[in-house]
Image (cartoon, rainbow, N blue to C red):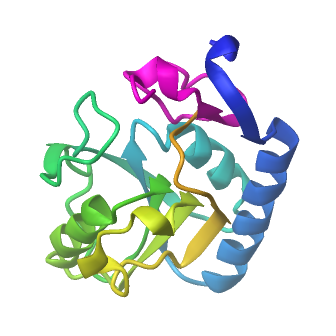
């Protein structure tokens, strides 16, 4: 796997520092509020695990599984709910959608609409990585993360939960995948 990585963007130590800073900010912003972290599976599971440990206030967790990629490297634009939240009661609660990477913004736009229909107190977005150059132009001013670990260039990244065809999630860092691996060269 490591031979497929062109460049390491964030080391394990850098990721830990990013997550701790996000956890501190979230803890301060939600002090005294009921917070539900909603992990978007599968990519955000590693980030979510570390983030919830970095948050120093009581919080609940839940998971959703959505798909908009299939086995490709670009979003299809069609969002499909594969697994909904386990809890039916989010009315009046503060939701923080935890995502591994904010790319086109279509999935998060859909999730905000979908979850918003259940009348939560608030919905905010926390993403480990933000790739604004890939944002759908119609969503550029609409989908802006409330918490962002780092802005990255338009490159295909894997590791720390991020995958290509379900591989590379277990790398302890975030790296740029060699284009030859996914047929872009």
Question: 27 and 165: which one is in front?
Answer: 165
Q: Main secondary structure of the magenta part?
A: loop
Q: Quadrant location of the N terminus?
A: top right
Q: How many marks?
A: 0
In the displayed structure, would residue 59 be above or below residue 147? above
In the picture, measured across the screen, residue 1 lies left or right of residue 103, that is right
Instruction: Find residue 9 and report its horizontal and vertical position in percent.
Output: 73, 44
**Residue 152 picture quarter:** bottom right
> Residue at image x 62%, y 65%?
58
In the displayed structure, would residue 181 be above or below residue 173? above
Instruction: Find residue 7 and report its horizontal and vertical position in percent.
Output: 73, 34
> Residue at image x 37%, y 87%?
141
Instruction: State the extent of the magenta-drawn residues as a range.
Output: 160-185
> Residue at image x 68%, y 45%?
50
Instruction: Find residue 119 and report its horizontal and vertical position in percent.
Output: 21, 82
Residue 76 lies in the magenta-colored region: no
Is residue 56 visible in this depiction of the protein?
Answer: no
């Amino acid at each position: 796997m490591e031979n497929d990585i062109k460049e390491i963007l964030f080391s394990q130590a850098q990721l830990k520092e990013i997550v701790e800073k996000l956890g501190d900010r979230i803890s301060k912003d939600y002090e005294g509020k009921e917070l539900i972290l909603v992990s978007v599976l599968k990519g955000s599971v590693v980030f979510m695990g570390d983030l919830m440990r970095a948050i120093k206030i009581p919080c609940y967790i839940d998971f959703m599984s959505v798909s908009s990629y299939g086995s490709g490297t670009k979003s299809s634009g069609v969002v499909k709910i594969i697994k909904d939240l386990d809890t039916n009661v989010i009315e009046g609660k503060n939701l923080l959608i935890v995502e591994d990477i904010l790319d086109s913004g279509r999935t998060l736009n859909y999730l905000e609409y979908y979850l918003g229909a259940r009348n939560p107190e608030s919905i905010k977005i926390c993403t480990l990585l933000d790739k604004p150059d890939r944002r759908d132009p119609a969503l550029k001013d609409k989908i802006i993360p409330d918490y962002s670990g780092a802005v990255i260039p338009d490159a295909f990244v894997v590791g720390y939960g991020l995958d290509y065809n379900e591989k590379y999630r277990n790398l302890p860092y975030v790296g740029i995948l060699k284009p030859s691996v996914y047929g872009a060269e």
